[in-house]
Image (cartoon, grey):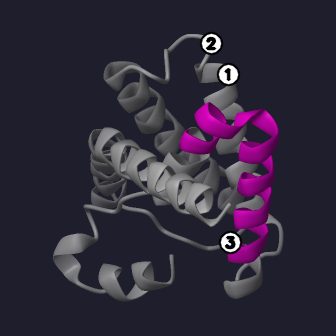
Amino acid sequence: MLVRGSLLNQRWLEFADLDLVTILIAYLWIHYGQTGAGLFALGQGVMMDLFSGGMMGLFALLYLFVFLAIKMGSRFFHLQSFRGLMILIVLAVLLRQLMLLGLLELFSFPIHFSWPTYVSFGISALVSGILAPPCFSLLNHVDIFVEKSFAKEE
């Protein structure tokens, strides 16, 4: 998360913004249940609020909306299939970005968004959706490695 700001300063990477937090929330939802995913979403949002200069509670609320979107969307899309995972991640990322715009407008922050901003939102959601299955695979391998290392210690 901390590297994200310096990477996004590169102009060509602005459109390919990977929302790793949403992917991690979905991963935790599958492997550790609602409680683990909800606590992670709230904790990540609070940490982002503490380290950003913005309005307190904004990111906590956004990531709780992402958690609820994944919870509601998992009724319609099977998270353990590639297609369902990609669709749900794309929708959750789009929801987070649109909720951010709505909340900023609601609290009267003078921010002007142009058409390329909305295009970058769509591209960011697509990139996050396409890269979600490889991220899940990587996280599964890390999880197996950690379990094996704890098993050796016992």
Percent position of residue 14, x then y: 28, 70
The residue lying at 55 percent from left, 46 percent from top is 98
Q: Amino acid at mark 3?
A: Phe
Vertical order, 34 against 151 (above or below): above
Q: Nearer the viewer, residue 24 or 146?
A: 146
Say if the magenta span includes residue 43: yes
Q: Amino acid at mark 2?
A: Arg
Residue that badge 1 annotates: 72
**Secondary structure mostly seen in the magenta stretch:** helix
The residue lying at 68 percent from left, 72 percent from top is 109
Percent position of residue 96, x then y: 58, 48
Percent position of residue 15, x then y: 26, 62
Vertical order, 40 against 10 (above or below): above
Label 2 Cα neighbours within 10 Å, binned few <14 / some 14-19 / many ≥20: few
The answer to whether residue 138 of the structure is visible from this angle is yes
Measure the alpha-carbon separation of dots 3 and 1: 30 Å
Say which mark, if any, is on residue 109.
3
Give SS at disc 3.
Answer: loop
Percent position of residue 21, x then y: 54, 57
Q: Are marks 3 and 1 in contact (CB under 8 Å)?
A: no
Q: Are marks 2 and 1 in contact (CB under 8 Å)?
A: yes
Residue that badge 2 annotates: 75
Q: Which residues are magenta?
A: 27-48
Say which mark, if any, is on residue 135.
none
Left or right of 49? Residue 131 is left
Say if the magenta span includes residue 94: no
